[in-house]
Image (cartoon, rainbow, N blue to C red):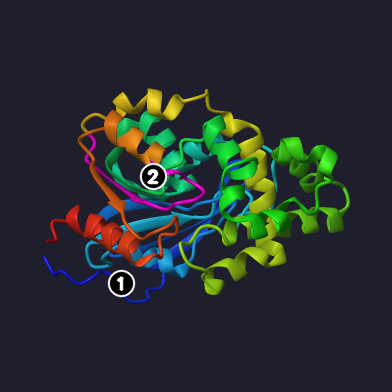
Amino acid sequence: MSDSLRSLYPEIEPYASGHLDVGDGHSVYWERAGTPGAKPAVFLHGGPGGTISQKHRRLFDPALYDVTLFDQRGCGKSTPHASLTANTTWHLVADIERLRELAGVEQWLVFGGSWGSTLALAYAETHPARVSELVLRGIYTLTKAELDWYYQFGVSEMFPDKWERFIAPIPPQERHEMMLAYHRRLTSDDRAVRLEAARAWSLWEGETITLLPEPSTSSTFGEDDFAHAFARIENHFFVHAGWLEEGQLLRDANRLAGIPGVIVHGRYDMPCPAKYAWALHKAWPEAAFHLIEGAGHAYSEPGILDRLIRATDGFVGKA
């Protein structure tokens, strides 16, 4: 194996795309890239409320993979935009199954980072027989402690300047419950109120996910359309703790037994403390575990990206 850091495969366009009516008024945008009939995989984006990008297609060798990517309910090219109706973890798990049936495969490799890792774990623990392998990055198990660390007290100590901007839209008397205070504004009937809150919520994340500032990454988070869906949907999921029981994903990690996997996590990941990746590693020891030094949360950070590409290569037999 080469010692040089691996990076994204060349740019590639989807060979097929469309919208799938998943019920409840939602239409989910999907696309497929790579080689039809090659090793099936599905990519789960972050957020919740994020979107797929052309770079996500490039995490897989296009000659050896047939990858399904999709925008989760309410975000990206899926419609209705920023909708919170019938939009829960379990709706998304059911959507992944619908997409698997659309792809016509019995099993597929599931790749997810950040919230995508949460959703991948929820899916794999619900439908273990449908998962051939798991590639997980930036582990997030959506416990109260993890939510408090990022939105109440913890990361605030590392980024006091950015935290000050995050709390600015919220009056001091409401700051003891930041997620709920934001929820009130993100569900306001006043679009201007929603957008002010959405930009502040979204930029807080965009500016704290990389070890070093990356304006090309964080600038996207401040764009109105992206921020509106991202903040509303993410906050909606987090206020409801993902419709998960406390500690459920680690508790049920025994259901992953027999599924080959790779866990990749940055040592200095601020949104998702490494403690939870380590706990998943202990609960699911057969998965390879890589704690990346000198890295934060984003998949684009060189050490993290290298391990992700090596993981997808490894599952198709490439050394």
Report the magenta residues as a range. 259-274
| Residues at marks 1 and 2, CA–CA distance in whole angstroms | 24 Å
- Which is nearer the eye, 282 or 167? 167
Q: Quadrant of residue 1?
A: bottom left
The nearer-to-camera label among 1 and 2 is 1
Q: Secondary structure at mark 1?
A: loop
Per the image, the residue denoted by label 2 is 100
For this rendering, which residue is in front, 26 or 58? 58
Across and down, in percent, residue 206 comes to 58, 61
The kind of residue tagged 1 is Tyr
| Label tally | 2
Question: What residue appears at the point 56 percent right and 40 percent down from the top-left corner?
Answer: 149
Magenta residue check for 263? yes
Residue 245 is situated, as x and y percent measured from the top left of the image, at: 52, 23
Answer with left or right where residue 44 lies relative to residue 221: left
Left of 252 or right of it: where is 315?
left
Q: Which residue is mark 1?
A: 9
Q: Residues within 10 Å of mark 2 (few under 14, many from 20)?
A: some
In this rendering, the answer to whether 315 lies above or below 222 is above
Which image quadrant is residue 178 in?
top right
Where in the figure is residue 30, as x and y percent of width and height?
49, 56
N-terminal of the pair, mark 1 or mark 2, is 1
Residue at x-position 28% and y-position 31%: 282
Q: Does the rendering let one see residue 18?
A: yes
The outermost residue toward the right is: 190
Q: Quadrant of the C terminus?
A: bottom left
What residue lies at 39% left-to-right and 55% top-to-bottom? 68
- Identify whether 258 is placed above or below 64: above
* Quadrant in which residue 229 is drawn: bottom right
Q: Is residue 220 above or below residue 98?
A: below
